[in-house]
Image (cartoon, coloured by chain):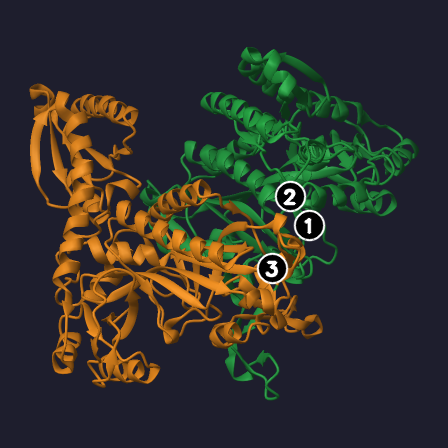
Chain colours: A green, B orange
């Protein structure tokens, strides 16, 4: 393990190695795709459960729409197709046949589709084409629908979790009778995302609005939550789009309002993806591996028995099993690793890599003394305590770890969130430490593009909160309404 | 509603209309695909939760493998590719571009893939190609993995839930160090499927082994659970495959066993799909709509307020809300439908169509008398009871409904499960009432094919339980080891 890459020397190599070492995911043999391994998937399931519950508490229901979308549907909303055309996986045939030489299979040219089908890169097109039949009157509104599924966007440069050809996500698609209601919905979902990402995944965020060049293809406004990684680069952790009446107009979705007048329906869409896994890894982890917030950790406490003889093994495991039962009864997720094929040292390192918040070790001496040894993953703190104190200590530590890793991330974000007023400093910071740089911008796409070309930094968002003092653009010197958030981004 | 198709006159039309009327699913604009509507999806989520819990209780974990599979992978197991080649959706390009006339988009010929990708029809190929890297020694075994996902099989004739181009399922893929362990696993999963489908979905089943011609492409043995629909046709409700070492050999997956010897790994795979939704609809429902087993019903009790004045409305809804809270606290899933845009009669019919097990209605007179009116969906029984008895009555009825609809289905299955010893009777029954016909068969694929051609009946399975007396083939008169189960099937 000493040979594993370090954060300071090569953040990117450290990340890639960690994802594999911790058993989270690996590159599939299919170009740009990943295999999400059971431990990584268990974390994703934790996230799904939490988000899904929150969606349902706010009145949303789940449904499922087709994976394959007729090519012509994508074209109906002009901005939408322009944004997605370059990364579409296209199904052109529906059958294989045996090769004439008997070796393997070939595509059967007789089974060519009349119209090609696109593997969904997002589902606005297929969903709004369906909503057309579901909505006649204001009585049919709102529709508050979500789906959990896979999507495919053909990416040229991919990285586990952060950017993969196929990824998993949830996409909410709502339809409303009024503009106000749609606007309220999109902000509700933005705040819901922020709350969950902050309170469960322990990630501090900046909420804001995307500029035109970073906006979702087909949206009128894109809201975003932006997080800062340990290397000073930003990551978009979730987005919520106010679609106005664009998709309703593209797919002719109209309704009779309470005044009896025919109008187009107002829409929103919003999503979080397996990218969030990347954010959580890059924000909290260290050179020894993953660090998981207890609230989303599949295993919150791991128990490792220490023994030499078979007799000791039996006694130690029996005691740990009793303690496990006790912790389980208070709702703690505990794994007792009783494998005899691995030494304790191997197990210690393994669960450190996997980011399990608390480790409990127990040996023959502990049995005599009626003690257990505890270790915290985040601070590496260790202590030996009376067995009777275990329940309380675990409960306290789980809470402390959750709070501590959030504060650590927040502190890092604050240190790296800087007001910058001259372009030289801006360029220098972007070339070295990165961070969220709050700077004035003249509001033009041209300036944004030039800054990006020169520094690789993009405008992450126009923040919803914070300073609204006007000033002068850091690049052009022209008037600026307010500071925006610049960063290099994943 | 009186114009809805009836089961006796046109079972097929009845089924299609019911799926749409109950808000379960509808045909998508994409050929052969379906949209699973929120109410249908909520039932699927119920099933997912129950199965997923049972998988985890038996030591399985979830993961996720790519949607797109290189064409060459499918070819590695000869039987496998032969079984799936004819129904594969093929991705050949990864980009669209604007059409030269500016109208819409076309496939970019410059973005042709070197090797075509198949949208997964099942994941044995991609999973075993991955297991190759995961398994070195017996210490890495067993792997007990499952994934919930979508798959695509290009079907020519499709029907909502029963046969769709894209469907949702779970696919378990396990790897073992010994043949015995793999055989034990596959039977464990078969029994687990049977138990859940029986105890939760209230469907009686016959468990058995598929004949060679009905076996999964790539399996050594396919086990199945078979259910009988109200029209006398069978439906395969789940399958579990013993793969032997076939996929291990095809993908070179070997391991060092405890004796230090290199051997191929033993495998199983098993799955249930959204077809189960079709089974549950076709077994329990009646001419008025869906009938749901309480254990999987998203809404177990619906409450409908009866009122004329606004004053009455407030009082009635307040009382129902209090009763709802009370039922919620005993774990009952209750919906209080307080929509003012729909009349009670409309709501009664709607929830009848949706198969909600119990309806509670309450009006001003009930308020005076401190009573509520209850109606059972399965028997249409109604009664008015003191409010104070509601909790107990609901608990009793939910249990009684669950038991009753299982017994009703079992009784139908038993009536239609017949021993048949002459081919004339066999043909006549298949042409009229259908059912599970237990008949002797000489064990040859030829006889099986001839019977199928003449009667449309296939061998659903060689049952695991029941009579093992030898006899003579109903078709050829040749010796038969035991009776097998024939039926026409969905």
Of marks 3 and 1, the one in the foreground: 1
Q: Which residue is mark 1?
A: A163
Quadrant in the rendering for residue B351: top left
- Residue A107 versus residue A481 in the image, above or below: below
Looking at the image, residue A152 sits to the left or right of residue B433; the answer is right
Q: Which residue is mark 2?
A: A275
Judge by depth and name the residue closer to the eye, A213 or B405: B405
Q: Are marks 1 and 2 on the same chain?
A: yes
- Residue A425 versus residue A156 in the image, above or below: above
Tag shown at residue A208: none
Looking at the image, residue A168 sits to the left or right of residue A208; the answer is left
If you read the primary sequence from the N terminus, does the residue marked by circle 3 or circle 1 appear first? Answer: 3
Callout 1: SS: loop
Mark 1, chain letter? Answer: A
Residue A206, x across and y down, in percent: 67, 30
Judge by depth and name the residue closer to the eye, A315 or B225: A315
């Amino acid at each position: 393990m000493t040979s594993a890459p370090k954060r300071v020397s090569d953040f990117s190599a450290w990340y890639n190695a960690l994802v594999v070492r911790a058993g989270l995911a690996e590159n599939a043999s299919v170009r740009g795709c990943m295999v999400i391994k059971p431990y990584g998937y268990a974390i994703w399931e934790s996230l799904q459960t939490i988000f899904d519950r929150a969606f349902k508490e706010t009145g949303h229901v789940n449904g499922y729409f087709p994976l394959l979308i007729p090519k012509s549907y994508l074209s109906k909303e002009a901005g939408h197709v322009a944004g997605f055309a370059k990364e579409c996986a296209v199904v052109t045939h529906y059958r294989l046949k045996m090769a004439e030489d008997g070796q393997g299979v070939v595509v059967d040219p007789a089974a060519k589709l009349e119209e090609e089908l696109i593997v969904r890169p997002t589902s606005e097109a297929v969903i709004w084409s369906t909503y057309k039949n579901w909505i006649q009157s204001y009585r049919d509104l709102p529709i508050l629908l979500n789906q959990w599924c896979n999507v495919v966007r053909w990416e040229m440069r991919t990285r586990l979790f952060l950017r993969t050809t196929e990824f998993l996500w949830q996409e909410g698609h709502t339809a409303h009778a009024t503009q106000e209601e749609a606007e309220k919905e999109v902000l509700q979902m933005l705040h819901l995302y922020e709350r969950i990402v902050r309170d469960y995944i322990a990630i501090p965020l900046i909420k804001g609005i995307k500029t035109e060049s970073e906006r979702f293809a087909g949206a009128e406004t894109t809201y975003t939550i932006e997080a800062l990684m340990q290397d000073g680069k930003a990551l978009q952790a979730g987005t919520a789009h106010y679609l106005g009446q664009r998709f309703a107009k593209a797919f002719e979705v109209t309704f009779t309002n309470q005044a009896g007048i025919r109008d187009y329906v107002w829409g929103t869409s919003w999503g979080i993806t397996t990218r969030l896994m990347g954010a959580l890894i890059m924000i909290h982890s260290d050179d020894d591996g993953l660090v998981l917030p207890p609230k989303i950790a599949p295993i919150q406490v791991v128990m490792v028995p220490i023994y030499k003889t078979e007799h000791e093994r039996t006694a130690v495991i029996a005691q740990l099993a009793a303690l496990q039962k006790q912790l389980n009864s208070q709702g703690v997720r505990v794994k007792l690793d009783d494998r005899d094929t691995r030494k304790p040292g191997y197990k210690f390192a393994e669960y450190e890599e996997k980011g399990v918040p608390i480790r409990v070790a127990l040996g023959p001496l502990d049995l005599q003394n009626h003690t257990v040894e505890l270790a915290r993953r985040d601070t590496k703190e260790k202590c030996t305590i009376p067995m009777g104190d275990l329940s309380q200590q675990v409960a306290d530590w789980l809470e402390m770890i959750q709070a501590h890793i959030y504060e650590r991330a927040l502190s890092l974000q604050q240190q790296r969130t800087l007001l910058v007023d001259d372009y030289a400093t801006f360029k220098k910071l972007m070339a070295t430490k990165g961070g969220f740089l709050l700077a004035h911008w003249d509001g033009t796409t041209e300036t944004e593009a030039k800054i990006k070309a020169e520094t690789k930094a993009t405008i992450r968002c126009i923040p919803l909160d914070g300073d609204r003092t006007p000033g002068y653009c850091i690049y052009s010197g022209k008037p600026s309404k307010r500071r925006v958030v610049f960063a290099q981004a994943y």
